Image: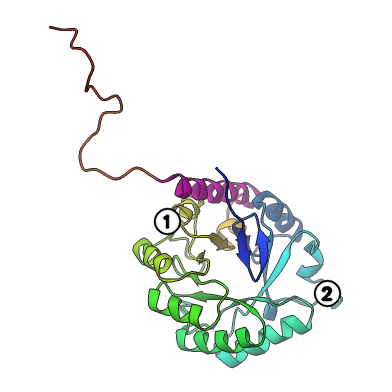
Amino acid sequence: MNDTNLVLGGKEFSSRLIVGTGKYATNELMREAHEAAGAQIVTVAVRRVSLPGHGDSILDHIDTSRYTLLPNTAGCYTADEAVRTAYLAREAGLGDMVKLEVIGDSRTLFPDTVGLLEATRTLAREGFVVMPYTNDDPVTARRLEDAGAACVMPLGAPIGSGLGIRNPYNVKIILESVSVPVIVDAGVGTASDAAIAMELGCDGVLMNTAIAGARDPVAMARAMRLAVEAGRLASRAGRIGKRLYATASSPLEGVPDWTS
């Protein structure tokens, strides 16, 4: 079965798994996990890393000839903060792609959708490839697309919670509501969560804690890679319909009755 690549900002990616860089015990372990994940896009929190050449930077441990950097505005609580952080990333040579976060609540880390829309409009107008982290609301997703977002990234559950996809029906409605890629961001805990996101029809999954926080991050990274690939293939293959009662795998219609 032929498939298309994930397209973001005019660039094509064969991998639909996007991974982060935080919470790893060592930078070597992070590199091994990235390799096992088969990812082509790697997120970095602009406000939490040193730039290359300024002490030991996590960016020194990412091969930018292999991975596309996706700076994110984690830790920003206003649209202005997020926009300034995105500009800083671009001036530092991290590119035009940005994972846009405007946090509205420090306890849940849920997004401030009003600030998110404002920042999306500003950055899209300035030529950024905006990938906004948002709630699982179809109306907000549609407005983000209208504001110029290159994709929408609804949360599956709160960041780092590992709860999996809490509202799959909302995600399905989002998929029907927008024409840009839909990438589940946040809440994935294990491989089955990633597979479910892809089986729903999502275009990709972004995760960090589920891999970095696993007992064996490299093994979990590989599991996530296989889950995303399997979920994508299953979605394109088309599942059977659900029925309340059994349907025989080997129908008896037309089979001679040898007992008579």
Is residue 21 visible in the rendered image? The answer is no
Do tag 1 and tag 2 residues touch (Cβ < 8 Å)?
A: no
Tell me, yes or no, whether the highlighted magenta stretch contains residue 237: yes
The residue at which mark 2 appears reads as 52
**Residue 39 left/right relative to 77:** right
Q: Quadrant of residue 200?
A: bottom left
Picture layout, residue 220 above or below residue 112:
above
- Residue closest to the eye, 193 or 170: 170
Mark 1 or mark 2, whichever is nearer to me: 1
Picture layout, residue 81 above or below residue 216:
below
- Residue closest to the eye, 9 or 207: 9
- In three-dimensional space, the C-alpha distance between marks 1 and 2, rounded to whole angstroms, equals 39 Å
**Residue 62 left/right relative to 173:** right
In x, y percent, where is residue 111?
48, 80
**Is tag 1's residue or tag 2's residue first in the polypeptide sequence?**
2
**Residue 171 left/right relative to 254:** right
